[in-house]
Each structure stands twice: as structure tokens, then as C-alpha cells.
Amino acid sequence: MKFKETSIPGAFILSPERHEDDRGYFARAFCETEFADAGITFHPVQSNVSYNRSAYTLRGMHFHAPPFEEAKLVRCSAGRLFDVAVDLRPHSPAFRKWIGVELSRNNGRSFFIPPGCAHGFLTLEDETEVFYQMSPAFVPGHDRGFHWNDPTIAIDWPGFPRVISEKDQMLKEIN
């Protein structure tokens, strides 16, 4: 795996090192040792799948309140999406800054989002599936969020969402 640092401390874009032959390819999606060599401590304890029927489905912006912040390793197993992390750590030099990365089955990239960041995505194709690993496990009652179009954060989404859950529509601006 190749780790590319981003402007959010602790957030990385990972590219697979594919070993190809006439069958297709093989690539490592996670290796605790390679993460540790890149300075990342990550012990995933939960894996989730998000299936999205329609292009321009938006999910986010979600995070967990302290002390239950989550780290996530996000990968697109089918389709294509624009994945976003927002740094919510008050002492971070990137506080309230965002990063967006395109993930797709074709490019094979993953996005590691450290604890203390919000996460959301916009699908860019129908039939998009997102697979992500988390640590620690989800703790009910500590999930939070803010509106996907918050002017304070000003995420430059690559399109306007067509499908948003009622819960995500009701999220307020960040305070």
C-alpha cells in the first residue's frame, strides 16, 4: 500500500499496490504492520457496508462525540463516490477544514479518517457500495452530525444531492 498524507493531520489516501496477471489482480486492503510503519495506530473492530441505489445519494456529515471518536478506513467496492472528512479537533492546525477524495472500484483507493473528524460522502454513480472498517465499535447515543451544506465548512461537492435521509436533512449547521 502507498500512503499519501493529506492536509488534515492523520488522514491518508491509500493506493493499492496491485499484483496483476491474466486472472486480474491481488492487492492488500489493510495491514496493521504497514499502517504502523506509516505512523497510524488502527485496530478495526467493526466493518460496515453502505449500499446506495442512486447516483447523488448523500450520507453525512457524521461523527461521534468524545470520548467515543471513531477512526474509519473507507473503500468503494462498487461504483464511485466523493468521500469527505472534516477535521473537528479544536487544537488541530486543520480545524474545520475539509478534504474530499474520489474513491471507486476502479481506482481502488481507500481513505483513512482519524478520530475527531466528521465523515460523509456523495455517490457519483448508481449502485455504489461503500465498505468501511471502524475503531472503536459504534456506541449508540453518541452519534452527531452537521448539515452537509454548512457555509462555515463550505464543502465543494461535485454535484447536488438528489437523495438525502430525513435525519441528514434535519441536521443543523455546525456551531
Image (tube, rainbow, N blue to C red):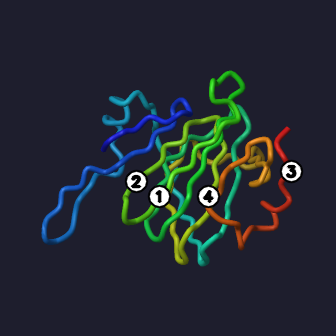
> In the image, residue 37 lies at what x, y percent?
33, 29
Q: Earlier in the sequence, mark 3 or mark 2?
A: 2
Left or right of 145 on screen, residue 157? left
Do the residues under discs 1 and 2 have CB atoms within 8 angstroms? yes
Label 1 Cα crowd, 10 Å radius (few <14 / some 14-19 / many 20+) = many
Q: How many marks?
A: 4
Q: Residue at x 47, y 71 (%)?
A: 79
Q: Alpha-carbon distance for marks 3 and 2?
A: 31 Å
- Residue 109's label in the rendered image is 2
Label 3 Cα crowd, 10 Å radius (few <14 / some 14-19 / many 20+) = few
> In the image, residue 71 lies at what x, y percent?
56, 40
> In the image, residue 58 lies at what x, y percent?
67, 64
Q: Which residue is mark 1?
A: 103
- Residue 172's label in the rendered image is 3
> In the image, residue 63 lies at what x, y percent?
69, 45
Q: Earlier in the sequence, mark 1 or mark 2?
A: 1
Left or right of 28 on screen, residue 91? right
Left or right of 170 on screen, residue 66? left
Residue situated in front as seen by the camera: 22 or 154: 154
